[in-house]
Image (tube, rainbow, N blue to C red):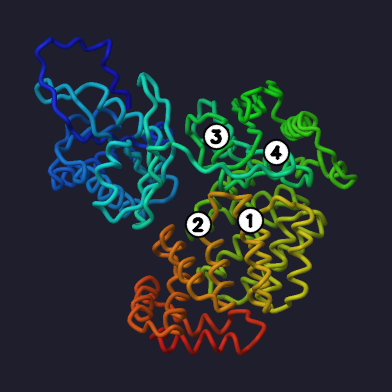
Amino acid sequence: MDNDTTDSHIMPLNVERRLAAILSADVAGYSRLMGEDEVATIRTLTAYRAAMVPLIQQHRGRVVDAPGDNVLAEFASVVDAVQSAVAIQEEIKRRNADLPISRRMEFRIGLNLGDVIVEEERIYGDGVNIAARLEALATAGGICISGPVYDQVETKLALGYEYLGTQAVKNIAKPIRVYRVTQEPGVPVPRPSSEKIQALVLPDKPSLAVLPFANLSSDPEQEYFSDGITEDLITDLSKLSGLFVISRNSVFLYKGRAIKPEQVSQELGVRYVLEGSIRKAGTRVRITAQLVDATTGYHLWADRYDRDLQDIFVLQDEVTQKIVAALEVKLTEGEQKRLGQPPTNNLEAYDYYLRGLDLQSDVTEEANALAQQLFTKAIELDPQFAAVYARLGWTYFDQWSVGWSQDPQTLEQTLALAQRAIALDSALSDGIRLLGIVYLWKKRYEQAIIEVERAIALDPNQADAYVALGEILNFSGRAEKTIALVEKAMRLNPYYKTWYLWCLGHAYYLLEQYEDAIATFKRALTRNPDFIPAHVYLAVLYSEVGEEEKARAESKEFMRLSPQGSFVTFSQRLPYKDPAVLERVLSAARKAGLE
């Protein structure tokens, strides 16, 4: 939504001005939805907008305008505006649950507090324009707020806020502070009044962050393709022992943000930043890329490639080789051999693989099932495509571990797919790590450790593998080694996943470092208040230290989040090597009221 009015709307000298909280919302992927089904899209948009208006009014706001897929509203209270935005996103999420993934309509919302010019029922000015820019920075289903909004609400609402730095936005003279709103109460955001973030110490080898390549294709649906190419580059580079490469999870938080390499360098603790763009049209693909020394601003290398789509793997290898040469990385004999090997010769299979990867990042049962279908289709097109077997195996493991499938054969299917992936590519670290995890749950501890250590040797920058090894060591009675492994993973993946904290907290619990364990599980719940394992082990911990009231409160949270679940039934399959440890957990759980 573009509300710029500087040149197009000349105001008289005596105009009415007022301070207002402005909400700007639009539909993410609106062009794609319209292209697929105009009638259904307009019907959904009309229904969703009709649901948004009363929520705005209930929070003492008023809708100013609603052109196209946009909604513009103003509020006298910043708190009311933020609460309204949260209520809107909750309502939209509830309605989307009834729709297929491809037809879901998600809104991006931006909120600003600023001076507006009032003309009859309309409002204009930078205050409105900044709200529109914030909306563009928000993710689908997300809310972004400006610094002035954050300053007003930080201690007034049970919400969390992630600081996204200062952003330079179109037609606004000064960069603005931006925060992402999360519905996770708790941790105060570091105040950027000093604006200095504690820089991480640079590693003793060339360190690199590969930012998500921008999708310049006319079709926004090609986003999966640019994301997939980025992920493949990260995967290829992370296998090189002479490089320190930041994990996908951390770099993808910068997607769609206008950010300077030096800020990335400071926040992720790297010296070099690779950025670029991808344009795919028909059978042609154009990739631009540049490698920057973020500590000096010096461009080490930049190039543009315009090729046939059939050459996509050759192109990726060229980019990797250019980076290796620019950073003077020495490759081992095995690394030289593995570089440049295409994962498949079937482009259609590769396309299904990339689409599946895109869905796999959305940890929902429906997305997982769709990813399974896409990976299966890729295998049908190329039965020798090793990486797809591993990814398909992870979908089955997620089904089993999350509880979407109660069939014990699901774990056996995971095992078979991991073994098939490795049979096709003995150096496929993703498949080897999966095999190690399956061995853990089969209580084959030594084999599990051997496989995950082998995965790390093949991919020394794979942060998840270090945590996986830590989890295996926890269950096999060697928790004292886990803490250093998780800390290493957190350095490789500074915006780490919640389950890293679960693994760390579990280690502290097993080592009877109760204060550290409780604090760590609380940190996990700050990130995800519905993270069931943290509630369960907090109940166990509080029970062991005699905090019975707190233990029962955590047990109630487990029962609220998993009304059909039974902790005792699930716990029987926890792969503790020492039966006494399992009994310790169960005894405290019973005392806490877990059933």
Give the image location of residue 411, x and y in percent: 64, 72
Q: Counting other residues with Cα less than 10 Å from the Cα at mark 3, is it few (<14), some (14-19), or many (20 or more)?
A: some
Distance from disc 3 to disc 4, alpha carbons, whole Å, reads 15 Å
Residue 498 makes an appearance in the image: yes
The amino acid at mark 1 is Ala
Question: Is 39 displayed left or right of 455 in the figure?
Answer: left
Give the mark nearer the N terminus: 1 vs 2. 2
Q: Which residue is mark 1?
A: 489
Distance from disc 4 to disc 1, alpha carbons, whole Å, reads 33 Å
- Eye-nearest disc, 4 or 1: 1
Give the mark nearer the N terminus: 4 vs 1. 4
Distance from disc 2 to disc 3, alpha carbons, whole Å, reads 21 Å
Q: Secondary structure at mark 1?
A: helix
Distance from disc 2 to disc 4, alpha carbons, whole Å, reads 26 Å
Q: Which residue is mark 4?
A: 347
Give the mark nearer the N terminus: 1 vs 3. 3
- Eye-nearest disc, 2 or 3: 2
The quarter of the picture where residue 330 lies is top right
Q: Quadrant of the N terminus?
A: top left
Q: Secondary structure at mark 3?
A: helix
Q: Is residue 563 above or below residue 200?
A: below
Q: Which residue is mark 2?
A: 363
The quarter of the picture where residue 296 lies is top right
Q: Counting other residues with Cα less than 10 Å from the Cα at mark 1, is it few (<14), some (14-19), or many (20 or more)?
A: many
Question: Is 406 displayed left or right of 85 in the figure?
Answer: right
Give the image location of residue 180, x and y in percent: 38, 43
Question: Is 279 displayed left or right of 190 in the figure?
Answer: right
The amino acid at mark 4 is Leu
Look at the numbered discs 1 and 2 and tell me whether their residues touch, using CB distance below 8 Å: no
Disc number for residue 222? 3
